[in-house]
Image (cartoon, rainbow, N blue to C red):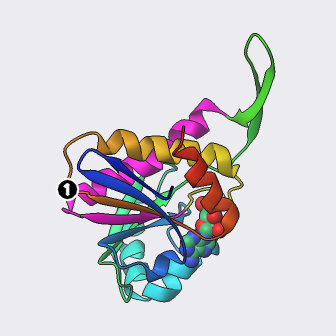
Amino acid sequence: MNEVEIGQSKIVFLKGDITKQQVDSIVNAANSSLMGGGGVDGAIHRAGWPAILEECKKIVAKQGRLPTGQAVITTGGKLLAKYVIHTVGPIYKSIRESDDQNWMIRGSENQREQLRSCYIKSLELAAEKGVKSIAFPSISTGAYRYPLSEAALIAVQAVKDFLKQETSIKDVYFVLFNDAAYEAYVEAVRH
Ligand code: APR
């Protein structure tokens, strides 16, 4: 099942390249410098260049590096999307947590909150601009090494929680770059 209705909105899961999506805004898994990088960050800057980078430079000059869990919005440049929302996910560091039965290896509560914040802050920024459709990549699950299944649960829950309120955002796409990511997100929405 690759689609789920939440109130007047829906969440759609698809495999593809986020730079090719015909939506109002796409979301970039950036780093705090906002100067681009590899992965989806590199793909978005390459496809939307140079206007996106120019605006990122102005943002950093004005407010400094972007903290983890925060988001900023720029033009989409040459992309089909009108806007790019840049957000910085947590770099995964597993910790051993124990409840009364067993030890769990997972991201710390802080990292879970930071990753959730990437989605909530991005959606809030998009709604402020009257965005109706937005596409997310699988934030933090590449270079930042967040385990897919855990990240997918956090991401889907954050979007579901946000869409329960009245919002201009009608369509939220998760654009997954490979089968493993796609399966993890489709599985997450079943929980
Ligand atoms: N479209 C959609 N998803 C993509 C694309 C694309 N064109 N390219 C890569 N991805 C996927 C990856 O397969 C992964 O599932 O995006 C997800 C996030 O991976 P990264 O891009 O590595 O992002 P992240 O793990 O958040 O690490 C961010 O990497 O690129 C640098 O500058 C970036 O320092 C930052 C760090």
Q: Residue at x 69, y 47 (%)?
A: 92
Q: Position of residue 181 (x, y in %)?
A: 64, 60
Please tell me whether residue 176 is drawn above or below residue 71 in the rendered image: below
Q: Residue at x 73, y 43 (%)?
A: 93
Q: Which residue is mark 1?
A: 168
Which residue is at the front of the view, 68 or 166?
A: 166
Q: Is residue 124 left or right of residue 95?
A: left
Residue type (three-letter) at the residue carrying disc 1 = Ser
Can residue 23 be seen here? The reply is yes
Q: Residue at x 53, y 42 (%)?
A: 190
Q: Is residue 41 left or right of residue 108?
A: left
- Would you say residue 123 sits in the magenta stretch? yes
Q: Position of residue 108 (x, y in %)?
A: 66, 33
Which residue is at the front of the view, 112 or 156?
A: 156
Please tell me whether residue 20 is drawn above or below residue 170 in the rendered image: below
- State which region is magenta: 108-137
Q: Residue placed farthest to the front in the image?
A: 1
Which residue is at the front of the view, 95 or 25?
A: 25
Quarter the C terminus occupies = top right
Q: Position of residue 41 (x, y in %)?
A: 55, 73
Q: Ligand 1 within 8 A of label 1's CB?
A: no
Q: Residue placed farthest to the top in the image?
A: 100
Classified by dominant secondary structure, the portion drawn in magenta counts as helix
- For ligand 1, which image quadrant applies? bottom right
At numbered mark 1, what does the secondary structure look like: helix, strand or loop? loop
* Few, some or many residues within 10 Å of mark 1 (<14, 14–19, 20+): some
